[in-house]
Amino acid sequence: MQNSQPAPASLPWLEPGDNFPEPSQAWGRSDPAPGLLAGGGALDEATLVRAYSAGIFPWFSDGQPILWWSPDPRMVLHVEDFTVHRSLRKTLKRFAANLRCDVRMDTAFDRVITACADTGARQTGTWIVPEMISAYRRMHSAGWAHSVETWINGELVGGLYCVAIGHAVFGESMFSRIPDASKIALAGLVAFCRHNGIRMVDCQQNTAHLASLGAREIPRPRFMGHIREASALPGPEWRFDARYWVEILDRKSPFA
């Protein structure tokens, strides 16, 4: 019997410095890996900035070549839609009121990305391979990548890291060493974004956890329009102030 399945689209292969294909050329729903755009290339600063500015991100496992993705639809968190359930609101109120608890930014980037990699390896295997860690350390040194950290009693207990180009923010990975520590970091990022007029955080892939916090899918063209506008704006100073918690805790929520 003849196979009726459509053949997958060919995958463009990049040499270092090559331009990316248009995101619209990424593999579709009927292909083996929807959202896959290209392979190869390099993870240098210039390439990564060009990729994120075009709505493209790298994602690959140990032993694989560099793979570049641009899913359609795209999972994003509109910061005004961040869902604060009753239990999380109580946790955030206690955290914000405790002088031994604080959210910090960019004070422990290496520790955050390493913890994210370790967490992924323990769970399902991680895409944050040593090559990626080195690349994002360079991005952090150049001011493109940031960590949002949850500290309790002087101990780093959770956090996340992200890429930011102007007002375009791209979430990468989170970790927790105690319950809700990564949610506190995400709430801190949302409060920071609201205070600075940043409207959206890219979440890349659809997960039930992100959806429970208010993230949802939008069409890729709409996402690309947002990235073009947001990346052209001057970026804020990446520093968290405890006064930003009013952006979360002083707003009414049906889940409060």
Image (cartoon, rainbow, N blue to C red):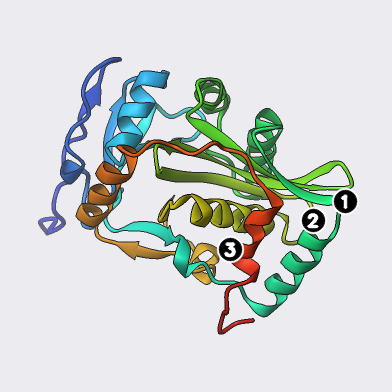
Q: Does 82 appear above or below 239?
A: below
Q: Amino acid at mark 1?
A: Arg
Residue 200 image point, x, y percent: 41, 55
Q: For mark 3, does the 10 Å Cα neighbourhood hold few (<14), some (14 to 19), or many (20 or more) residues?
A: some
Q: In the displayed structure, does residue 32 sit left or right of residue 156?
A: left
Label 2 sits on a secondary structure element that is loop
Pointer 2 residue = 178
Tell me how far mark 3 sits from mark 2, CA to CA. Answer: 24 Å
Q: Does 220 appear above or below 170?
A: below
Quadrant including the C terminus = bottom right
Label 1 sits on a secondary structure element that is loop
Q: For mark 1, does the 10 Å Cα neighbourhood hold few (<14), some (14 to 19), or many (20 or more) residues?
A: few
Task: Examine the image and state in which quarter residue 245 appears.
Answer: bottom right
Tell me how far mark 1 sits from mark 3, CA to CA. Answer: 21 Å
Q: Amino acid at mark 2?
A: Ile
Mark 1 against mark 2, which lies toward the viewer? 1
Q: Nearer the viewer, residue 237 or 42?
A: 237
Pointer 3 residue = 247
Pointer 1 residue = 100
Q: In the displayed structure, does residue 111 sit left or right of residue 10?
A: right
Residue 65 image point, x, y percent: 39, 26
